[in-house]
Amino acid sequence: MYKQISIITLSMMLLMGCSGTVPTLGLNDGQLMPCPDSPNCVNSQQAADEEHFIAPIDFIGTQQQAKVRLLHILKASERTNIVVVEENYIRVEFTSQVLQFVDDVEFYFPSTISDKISIHVRSASRIGHSDFGVNRERIEQIRNKFNAYEQQ
């Protein structure tokens, strides 16, 4: 009986620890934070290598239109917690279904004088080393929904 309780307690501690602590996020001089060396992060601004680089999401229209469209997509996504919404920045937490791992996803809408906007993105796992491409896949899914949205 003691062994079963110990296993259950240890399992619960491990599962609760899967969310990790929130890393330093946000903007620094108009740039999203760089990715760590681990392969569980993609970034459209601060990535010096192909493993971490992902293209920004391009949009023709206003910053406000892009933000409204993106928020609509994010609100419809499962296991999503929108944490910060500012004029030019959105931060979201995505939680995996089984182990409750949390990934931090950021979107930055830099000001521009043209009607072409590049929404910069950063998506990173809080814990672990590899994410098996989950963060890259998530951004590509959001990009596809974002681009399909204009055809509705």
Image: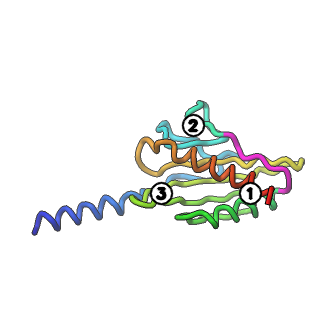
Q: Is residue 75 magenta?
A: no
Q: Earlier in the sequence, mark 1 or mark 3?
A: 1
Residue at image location 51% in from the left, 54% down from the top: 103
Q: Secondary structure at mark 3?
A: strand
| Position in image of residue 24 (x %, y %) | 54, 52
Compare residues 122 and 23 and report the one nearer the observer. 122
Of labels 1 and 3, the one closer to you: 3
* Left or right of residue 14, residue 88 in this image: right
Residue at image location 44% in from the left, 41% down from the top: 130
**Amino acid at circle 1:** Asn
**Which residue is disc 2 drawn over?**
52
* Left or right of residue 15, residue 95 in this image: right
**Amino acid at circle 2:** His
Residue sitting farthest toward the left: 1
Q: CA distance from mark 1 to mark 3?
A: 23 Å
**Amino acid at circle 3:** Val
**Which residue is disc 3 drawn over?**
102
Circles 1 and 2: CB distance less than 8 Å? no
Q: Earlier in the sequence, mark 1 or mark 2?
A: 2
**Which residue is disc 1 drawn over?**
88
Residue sitting farthest toward the right: 114
Q: Over which residues does the magenta segment extend?
A: 55-62
Q: Quadrant of the C terminus?
A: bottom right
Q: Which mark is residue 98?
A: none
Q: Quadrant of the N terminus?
A: bottom left
Q: CA distance from mark 3 to mark 2?
A: 18 Å
